[in-house]
Image: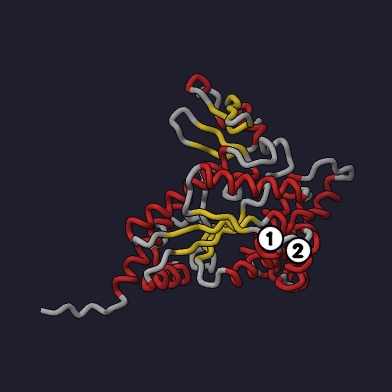
Amino acid sequence: MPLTTAPDTLPQTTGAAILNLLLPHHRTTVEAPVPASAEAFPHQLRRITDFVRAGAPIVFTLPGFPCKSPNPAKTLGHLPDMGERLSLTFLDTLCARIERIHPPGARVVICSDGHVFGDLIRVPDDRIDAYSDELRALIRQSDLHRLSVFDLRDVLGDLPPDAGRAHVHDRYAPTLDALRAEVRTDATALALYRGITRFLVEDTAGFTGTRSALQRECRARAYGVIQRSRAWGALIADHHPSAVRLSIHPQPAGAAKFGIRLLDAPDVWTTPWHSAALREPDGTWTLMPRARAARLGRLVHRDGRPSHFERSSADGHRSFATARR
């Protein structure tokens, strides 16, 4: 008896299976008692299915990996370290798992956004260049061939960073009034604004004013960071119009962006560029501020540079709560 299955069933089934590989790593705004199903992400499911139907590699774009935080209590330096190495390896491995279901495979375009708001986060452009260049070198040396890096230099060539930032902002950024109205009325936008404000306060070094003055300044800068981030997202969409959009920020189920957790961390906002990696005796990894990791483990160097911290089993009696003091 002939099959009566609709011709689109197989691509949709494969698309759902691919999305199910991402769901355990979903970084969400609210922890649900029951994990969301693939059907709760119609935007991503549709785009993945389109790639499957076309027999093409699935393209994911991930804005992030901008540069290291300038706060020395949070990071080991200004270049990528074990946190980035583990995160990039995770992304490449995820693509390899997709390849088992969808032979054309998948790739992730790391859209390094440091130049987009370097002036607002107070990181010099030469350090942003060095970080992005080292990301490319790390991908090449580790043979993570399913990954690539895309940054402002790929769009605007040798245009000076200040001019590049102005170009992207003027063409793509939402108005300040529109953004403020959104933050007042949208819970997700408010959470993002508060999270970025907190990071800016933590990362500001050498501020001579009062704590309240610093917070006021960082709240103003946070709006600028979100404006530029939105502008960068719009530019990425222009250059990769069919891609599945990932985000390092928490996203609710059903959002146009899929929030993805790169590594375990106590805080859903923690990223490899705002922290250091700590290896536990059982081989698992956690991201946390450098100062806290230093109280829990010993510093390990790799290729002549600080790489991560490692806690031996003898240190197990020192609890995480103690380390927070």
Percent of width and height locating residue 178: 73, 73
Q: What residue did someone put label 2 on? A: 164
Q: Residues within 10 Å of mark 2 (few under 14, many from 20)?
A: some
Q: Inspect this view and state whether residue 59 appears.
A: yes
Tally the numbered discs.
2
In the picture, the quarter occupied by the N terminus is bottom left
Q: Which of 16 and 166 is in front in this view?
A: 166
Check disc 1 and report its element: helix, strand or loop: helix
Q: Which of 154 and 307 is in front in this view?
A: 154
Q: Nearer the viewer, residue 17 or 140?
A: 140
Percent of width and height locating residue 244: 50, 66
Q: Measuring 51% from the left and 32% from the top, which residue is drawn there?
A: 279
> Please, what is the three-letter code of the amino acid marked with disc 2?
Gly
Percent of width and height locating residue 195: 67, 53
Q: What residue did someone put label 1 on? A: 152
Q: Residue furthest front?
A: 158
Q: Measuring 59% from the left and 28% from the top, which residue is drawn there?
A: 301
70, above or below 113, in the image: above
Could you say which disc has been placed on residue 230 in the image? none
Residue 8 vs residue 122: left or right? left
> Please, what is the three-letter code of the amino acid marked with disc 1?
Leu
Q: Are marks 1 and 2 in contact (CB under 8 Å)?
A: yes
Q: Measuring 66% from the left and 30% from the top, which residue is drawn there?
A: 325
Q: Residues within 10 Å of mark 1 (few under 14, many from 20)?
A: many
Residue 81 vs residue 21: left or right? right
